[in-house]
Amino acid sequence: MKLIPVVCAILISDSRVLAVRRSSKMPLVGFWEFPGGKIENGESEKESLKREIQEELNLTVEVGVPLTPTEYSYEDGKVIRLIPFLVREFSGEFRLAEHDDFAWLGRNELLNVNWAQADIPIVKELVKKWEEIKKQP
Ligand SMILES: Nc1nc2c([nH]c(=O)n2[C@H]2C[C@H](O)[C@@H](COP(=O)(O)OP(=O)(O)OP(=O)(O)O)O2)c(=O)[nH]1
């Protein structure tokens, strides 16, 4: 079994969380996810996340605290270990380089989009611990 480590950012602004939709150029087209991607050789988790968010959203981020990582086996045999970090500090001119849609979702809207399977436990954790997470750096 090959475990693929993937980092993702939970960008929070005004009590809303950023979700992005995978485009037809990407596997899992149409599914919503947190921006991020695979850790490359030699990178730390945080370095990798900073690089991915710069590439995907054109934003420079300050990586905050991690939430609980999840593991999920997709049908093609890929096993993803998805490692989420909160991000509250970011700057730059937001644009989508790879995804084809985005949404800033409040707590009660979080479960309305079609999340990639690996993200569902993270989204549930967010909904459950919303008040606590809102206070975290
Ligand atoms: N970035 C991100 N990827 C996720 C999430 N949930 C989830 O299952 N994934 C999966 C989709 C991909 O298989 C993998 C992330 O890889 P990626 O986006 O860097 O790369 P990719 O597979 O699209 O493309 P490639 O590098 O294989 O060419 O993790 C998520 O919330 N964010």
Image (cartoon, rainbow, N blue to C red):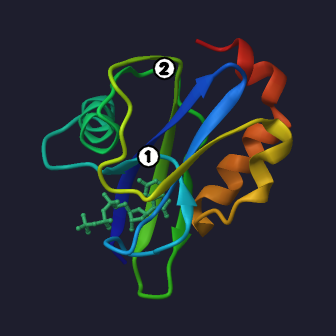
Q: Nearer the viewer, residue 23 or 74?
A: 23
Q: Residue at x 79, y 54 (%)?
A: 111
Q: Is residue 57 left or right of residue 123?
A: left
Residue 49: give x, y in percent of width and height.
33, 36
Q: Residue at x 81, y 37 (%)?
A: 107
Residue 52: give x, y in percent of width and height.
28, 41
Q: Hey, which residue is sitting farthest left in the picture?
A: 42
Disc 1: which residue: 35
- Helix, strand or loop at mark 2: loop
Ligand 1 image-quadrant field: bottom left
Give me the disc on residue 120: none
Disc 2 packing (10 Å; few <14; some 14–19; many ≥20): some
**Three-letter code, disc 2:** Gly
Q: Hey, which residue is sitting farthest bottom in the picture?
A: 76
Disc 2: which residue: 64
Q: Is residue 32 left or right of residue 9?
A: right
| Mark 1 close to ligand 1, CB under 8 Å | yes
